[in-house]
Image: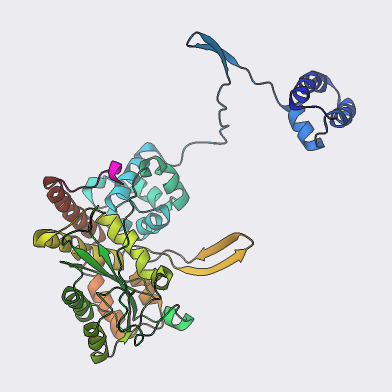
Amino acid sequence: MGLNMQERKAVTREYITRYEKATKKEKKAILDEYTMLTGYHRKSAVRLLNAKPVKQVMVYIDGKPVKIKPEKKRPSNRKGKRIYSDEVIAALRLVWMFFWYKCGKILAPLMRQQMAFIARWPAFAITEEIAEKLKKISPASIDRYLKKDKADMKLKGKSLTKPMKSLKSRIPIRTFYSSEERKTPGYWQIDTVHHCGQATCGEYLHTLTATDVASGWIELRPMQNNAQKWTFEALSDIYASTVLPILEFHPDNGSEFINNYTETWCKNNRIAFTRSRSNKKNDNCFVEQKNGAVVREYVGYDRLEGTEEQTLLAAIYKPLVPLLNFFMPTQKLKSKTRIGSKEIKVYDEPISPFQRLMDSSQTPEKIKVLLLEKIALYNPVELQHNVNKAILRLRRRLAQSNRIITKEEK
């Protein structure tokens, strides 16, 4: 029989003193002897015999002696001066909070592209030196410096889509987009977000979310409820106001979309109308991710109801939509490879939907001209400032009615 663990530890303590004082030739002989006695691998033996004994501190807890090992201090490999001072991190934190807590991969290109607007905003108090450092800071450094500020900021909602059996046989199912369709603007996925809070009873507001598959362009419309009337009005408004073409609407199986009214309207306007498979959210993945990353991120999970709160919600979406479409960088999945149990995903460089449309050869020149005319009307910092003020007005309204979801109610 071999040695048990306690016997191995006792033998190790005896050999450590010999090994520490031995020459290189003697250490080789000691290792041979030690590995044969304990059965350790030679690399493990070297690590154990080179380990310095950990000093233990004796403390008394409730009158009983307890040995406590001191915490290991992580060795610092930092050489030279800090690149990003406290002033730079403080300015970074203000910009991060102002632009609604974006991750480093989004915030870094946003600051590089829009620093001319950001540096002029007086609330940030950004000097030329700080501006240059914020333009050079990497996404990983942003996430590392802001790691402590990101705790407990996510909530989970409920999925309340109710499938409708009628018309399903007439509406084709789409499960994927071809490589050509992924590059061509005009293929829209649509969905609704329920602002019901903790209970689904009664009437509450909804948001209709529409996103273009090729560019990531997003449109948001508040609705009194998910009745067919309000859904149709929201779709008609998107069709009339958006700069991009609309070749197809692709919803899930909710009854607010799968109805004769919407089907007939799409046919009359020569818009293809497809749907997802039942209980397969990945068929509508482009808009599903916008529900969480945009609507839930900015509006939250609180219960919204009534025309006054619908007006406040519309006031949020009015500056938010151009901010996201013209200035906020997004990433698109380029490839996905599975190696064993690991799935390796490769994303493109973060750019805004506007830039993605301008770089695409599939975007008509007329649309590019309209986009250039529209972006000249906006300032990203002013748009974000208006979004923040509109959100604050909505939060005050909810606080007055005691309908804000707290962290304990997650």
Magenta range is 402-409
Residue at (85, 31) in percent of width and height: 35
Q: Number of labelled discs? A: 0
Q: Residue furthest top?
A: 63
Residue at (14, 62) in percent of width and height: 310
Task: Report the predominant secondary structure element of the magenta stretch.
Answer: loop
In the image: residue 13, left or right of residue 85: right
Residue 406 sits inside the magenta stretch: yes
Residue 227 sits inside the magenta stretch: no
From the viewer's perspective, is residue 362 above or below residue 196?
Answer: below
Report the front residue among 212 and 303: 303
In the image: residue 206, left or right of residue 356: left
Report the front residue among 119 and 92: 92
Dividing the picture into quarters, in which one does residue 18 lie? top right
In the image: residue 235, left or right of residue 359: left
- Residue 74 on image: x %, y %: 56, 32
What colour scheme governs how the chains and residues are painted in the rendered image of this protein?
Answer: rainbow
Dividing the picture into quarters, in which one does residue 307 lie? bottom left
In the image: residue 269, left or right of residue 137: left
Q: Residue furthest front?
A: 165
Q: Residue furthest left?
A: 308
- Residue 52 on image: x %, y %: 69, 23
Residue at (12, 48) in percent of width and height: 401
From the viewer's perspective, is residue 345 above or below residue 6?
Answer: below
Name the quarter where the N terminus is drawn: top right
Dividing the picture into quarters, in which one does residue 93 lie? top left
From the viewer's perspective, is residue 107 above or below residue 281?
Answer: above
- Residue 400 on image: x %, y %: 11, 46
- Residue 127 on image: x %, y %: 31, 46
